[in-house]
Amino acid sequence: MLPSLIPRLLLALGVPAAVQATQSWHNTGTTAGWDTFTQEHEGTVTEVTNVFYRGPSALKMTQIHDASYTGRYHSEAVHYNAYKRGDAGFWGFAFRLQSDWQFAPDSQGFNLAQFIADFTDLGCEETYMPGTMVWIEGDKLFARVKYGEVCPTSAQQTRTFREIATVTAGEWHRVVIQASWQSDSSGFFKLWFDGVKVSETYNIPTTVGDGRYFQFRVGLYANGWHDHGYQGTQGTRQVWYDQIAAGSEFKDADPDGWTA
């Protein structure tokens, strides 16, 4: 029998054809392979070999508070064209907070990863708009999805998944996201933390109506310093990243599920 006829015969018999997992992109904790970096003010993104998850290297993201500075605090690695409306898949990364990370006060937020797109051409109040974000407040992990319309900003809506995991300073953690990016109620969002599913929601919108591509960024974005003011006494913050990937199955994105 011709090989090309086998999948059709299986479908005719009601037997689902096997779908091969596909890792669409990965990075092993290096500065090579990214489309760009955001390093605002005194922030840095560096490749290091003394701290890593799998090795031999990891990305170290640093931000330093400056009381005289009024801008934002991004230190991120950026991968273009991560998803557009209608796509689905898995995205994952390993991260580690510095061992003396100051969690108090609990209300101080630091973003760890985000999907974001440039909407400057729309003439909105917001030029770059983040959609899905993953962050910590105190030692608790949060995530969100954004839906509605980009303009005006009052048409944007968010759904937040609160306190879904506890983060430990100085230890490596694994995050895997699975999402179906839909602007209607046919989408879903799931998140695994250290291999345990901690969030799962179906039949929800997960992205905005505009169909352009979103970037995927991992890194330290000290948005709390800009949005709510500096709190605590730790003005230098560091987060390490390793084993960042995307694909069609969980193992494609799970930091423990693949090797380069």
Image (tube, rainbow, N blue to C red):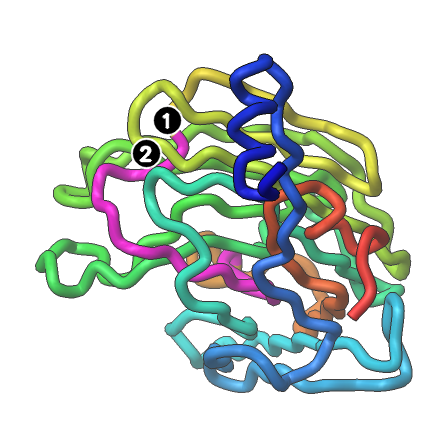
Secondary element at tag 2: strand
Instruction: Categorize mark 2 by other alpha carbons within 10 Å: few (<14), some (14-19), many (20+).
Output: many
**Front in this rendered view, residue 99 or 192:** 192
- Is 239 placed left or right of 49 in the picture? left
Secondary element at tag 1: loop
**Front in this rendered view, residue 108 or 259:** 259
Residue under the image location 21 percent in, 59 percent down:
119
The amino acid pointed to by label 1 is Pro
Is residue 107 among the parts visible in the rendering? no
**Residue 65 at what x, y percent from top left?**
57, 75
Q: Is residue 14 above or below residue 85?
A: above
The C terminus, quarter of image? bottom right
Is residue 164 among the parts visible in the rendering? yes
**Residue 126 at what x, y percent from top left?**
22, 56
Residue under the image location 86 percent in, 64 percent down:
100
Residue named by callout 1? 205
**Front in this rendered view, residue 219 or 179:** 179
Residue under the image location 88 percent in, 64 percent down:
99
The amino acid pointed to by label 2 is Tyr
Residue named by callout 2? 147
Residue under the image location 59 percent in, 14 percent down:
13
Name the N-terminal-most of marks 1 and 2.
Answer: 2
